[in-house]
């Protein structure tokens, strides 16, 4: 008790500073992010626990609406887990995750869930795919050179080909993602950017286009190997539409792609 009494002033000052930080309003957050990349409006609450009534990202000069954003920071989880919980919602578009930075400097996203309409992708990529997409991830890890691992499931539901030739129902699919194992030959090159870090198994849940295969990802590129079967895989109009990436086979077609990120 005597030790505590002699240090009562610095301890009181520390307590006061802590209370001030905890109660600091959320409004200064809008000054921490570049407004040409992230816009927050209607900020309420504190830096530790608050929300923005509307937010959007700017990607390739196009606004990507995030909608309402809620966050909560739990400092007691700093040393053993991900202390920041973030949720965004805009209609059926939902993103929820826990975020943290490890002592190695790697950013970790855990217990994540995402759901969105594929129409969002059409604003940024030349794809003709309708439907909804979602995912649940145990973890996703980013390092200095890019993504380093992920474990979870990506789902594509009720997909439809929406090219000018007409609407063609395709089906529903899933991709089971796992951290790619390190082989004995790769042990000495675990930090190599071209080492495979994620492997995904593609399977068909239902539909007239049956897809099966493997996708893999490194920090610098991707590799896709898929086989397509079923009625749609033999449709002449659809085959012409995908002829740039498809190689005809007896049962349908194959897709083999490699590229840089």
Image: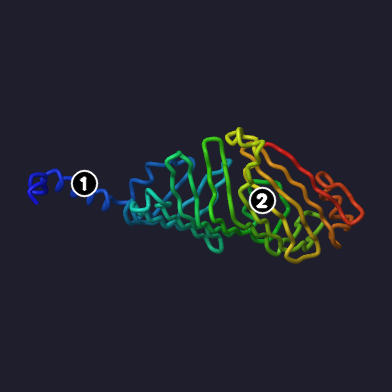
Percent across and percent down for residue 40 are: 42, 50
Query: How far, Cα to Cα, is label 1 from label 2?
Result: 48 Å
Q: Which secondary structure lies at badge 2?
A: helix
* Residue 62 visible from this viewpoint: yes
Percent across and percent down for residue 102 are: 44, 44
Please say if 224 is above or below 163: above
Q: Decide: few, some or many residues near mark 1? Use Cα within 10 Å; few <14, some 14-19, many ≥20.
A: few
Q: Which secondary structure lies at badge 1?
A: helix
Contact flag, marks 1 and 2 (Cβ < 8 Å)? no
Residue at the extreme front: 184
Q: Nearer the viewer, residue 2 or 84?
A: 2
Q: Residue at x 9, y 52 (%)?
A: 1
Which numbered disc flags the more N-terminal residue, 1 or 2?
Answer: 1
**Which quadrant does the C terminus fall into?**
top right
* Residue 261 visible from this viewpoint: no
User: Which residue corresponds to mark 1?
Assistant: 17
Q: How many marks?
A: 2
Name the quadrant containing residue 244.
Answer: top right
User: Which residue corresponds to mark 2?
Assistant: 122
Q: Nearer the viewer, residue 101 or 88?
A: 101
Q: Is residue 244 left or right of residue 69?
A: right
Q: Nearer the viewer, residue 165 or 254?
A: 254
Name the colouring of the figure: rainbow
Q: Decide: few, some or many residues near mark 2? Use Cα within 10 Å; few <14, some 14-19, many ≥20.
A: few
Residue at the extreme bottom: 206
Percent across and percent down for residue 41 are: 41, 52
User: Which-is-in-front pick, marks 1 and 2?
Assistant: 1
Q: Residue at x 45, y 47 (%)?
A: 39
The label number, if any, that marks residue 84 in the structure image:
none
């Amino acid at each position: 008790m005597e030790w505590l009494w002699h240090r009562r002033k610095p301890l009181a000052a520390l307590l006061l500073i802590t209370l001030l930080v905890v109660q600091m309003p959320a409004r200064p957050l809008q000054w921490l992010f570049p407004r040409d990349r992230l816009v927050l409006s209607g900020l309420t609450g504190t830096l530790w626990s608050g929300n923005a009534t509307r937010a959007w990202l700017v990607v390739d000069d196009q606004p990507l609406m995030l909608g309402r954003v809620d966050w909560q920071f739990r400092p007691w989880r700093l040393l053993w887990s991900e202390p920041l919980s973030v949720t965004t919602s805009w209609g059926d578009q939902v993103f929820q995750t826990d975020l943290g930075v490890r002592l190695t400097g790697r950013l970790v996203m855990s217990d994540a869930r995402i759901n969105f309409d594929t129409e969002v992708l059409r604003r940024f990529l030349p794809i003709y795919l309708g439907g909804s997409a979602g995912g649940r991830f145990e973890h996703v890890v980013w390092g200095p050179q890019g993504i380093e691992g992920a474990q979870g499931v990506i789902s594509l539901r009720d997909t439809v080909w929406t090219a000018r030739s007409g609407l063609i129902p395709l089906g529903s699919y899933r991709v089971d993602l796992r951290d790619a194992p390190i082989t004995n030959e790769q042990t000495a090159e675990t930090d190599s950017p071209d080492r495979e870090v994620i492997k995904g198994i593609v399977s068909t849940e239902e539909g007239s286009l049956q897809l099966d295969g493997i996708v893999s990802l490194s920090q610098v590129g991707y590799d896709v190997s898929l086989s397509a079967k079923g009625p749609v895989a033999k449709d002449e109009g659809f085959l012409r539409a995908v002829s740039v990436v498809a190689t005809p086979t007896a049962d349908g077609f194959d897709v083999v792609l490699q590229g840089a990120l």
